[in-house]
């Protein structure tokens, strides 16, 4: 089993507008850093091909992102398949949208987004509506979203757009992660 943590992208997006004067330039610079973790689980037969999975975890609390990532890895560790799993961490809805944009440019399939509801800049429900509109325009591949929240499900369920598949209580446990894998048709733990 190998385990590496590397930055997925340290990206600067620049917009420079040229003025009639060669000495002046107006520049807007946005910078962000998304963290990527990758683990390979060789639990199946040697001749079995690997199931590749990629998730985006969205939460403004670093500890919760780490906890969710550990639960995903621990859940996969218990299955009887060969699985490679990549987890991209985003601190809010803005970083999630940027991660989807980068994945789209690099032609990386994102299997699921797991998002918190209450975050500093853009809530999970608001970012779900933005992402849903972008997906409807065909700019991003269709990606299911799941919500992990400490809030009451009845208070927030109607805030989400239609592509949010399910709302879970926070923190996620192995049963919730197994359910996410099953709903995404990635792994069925009942047959393992």
Image (spheres, rainbow, N blue to C red):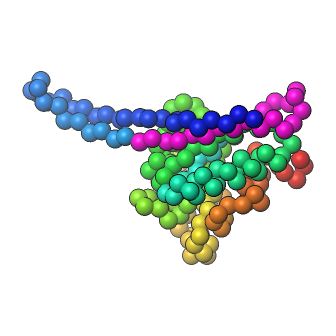
Q: Residue at x 21, y 32 (%)?
A: 17
Would residue 14 be visible to someone looking at this image?
Answer: yes
Front-most of residues 188 and 119:
119
Residue 157 position (above or below residue 134) = below
Residue 148 position (above or below residue 192) = below
| Magenta-span inclusion, residue 40 | yes
Give left or right: position of 182 versus 48.
left
Front-most of residues 4 and 186:
4
Give left or right: position of 134 versus 142.
left
Q: How far across and how far down the image is residue 138, in percent?
A: 53, 41
Q: Residue furthest top?
A: 22
Question: What range is drawn magenta here?
Answer: 32-50
Residue 155 position (above or below residue 137) = below
Q: How far across and how far down the image is residue 86, in percent?
A: 64, 39
Front-most of residues 155 and 129:
155
- Residue 45, image quadrant: top right
Q: Residue at x 55, y 47 (%)?
A: 89
Q: How far across and how far down the image is residue 81, in percent?
A: 84, 39
Give left or right: position of 37 versus 174.
left
| The N terminus lies in quadrant | top right
Q: How far across and how far down the image is residue 192, in percent?
A: 89, 47
Residue 146 position (above or below residue 84) = below
Q: Residue at x 75, y 50 (%)?
A: 74
């Amino acid at each position: 089993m190998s385990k590496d943590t590397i930055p997925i992208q340290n990206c600067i997006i620049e917009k420079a507008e040229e003025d009639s004067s060669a000495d002046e330039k107006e520049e807007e610079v946005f910078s962000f850093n998304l963290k990527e973790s990758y683990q390979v689980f060789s639990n199946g037969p040697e001749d079995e091909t690997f199931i590749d999975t990629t998730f985006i975890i969205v939460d403004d609390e670093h500890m919760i992102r780490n906890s969710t990532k550990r639960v995903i890895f621990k859940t996969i560790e218990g299955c009887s398949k060969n699985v490679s799993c990549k987890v991209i961490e985003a601190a809010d809805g803005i970083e999630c949208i940027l991660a989807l944009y980068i994945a789209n440019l690099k032609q990386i399939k994102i299997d699921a987004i797991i998002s918190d509801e209450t975050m500093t800049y853009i809530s999970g429900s608001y970012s779900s509506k933005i992402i849903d509109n972008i997906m409807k325009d065909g700019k991003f591949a269709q990606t299911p979203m799941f919500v992990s929240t400490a809030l009451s499900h009845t208070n927030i369920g109607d805030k989400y757009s239609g592509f949010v598949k399910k709302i879970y209580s926070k923190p996620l446990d192995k049963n919730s992660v197994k359910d996410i894998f099953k709903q995404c048709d990635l792994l069925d733990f009942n047959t393992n």
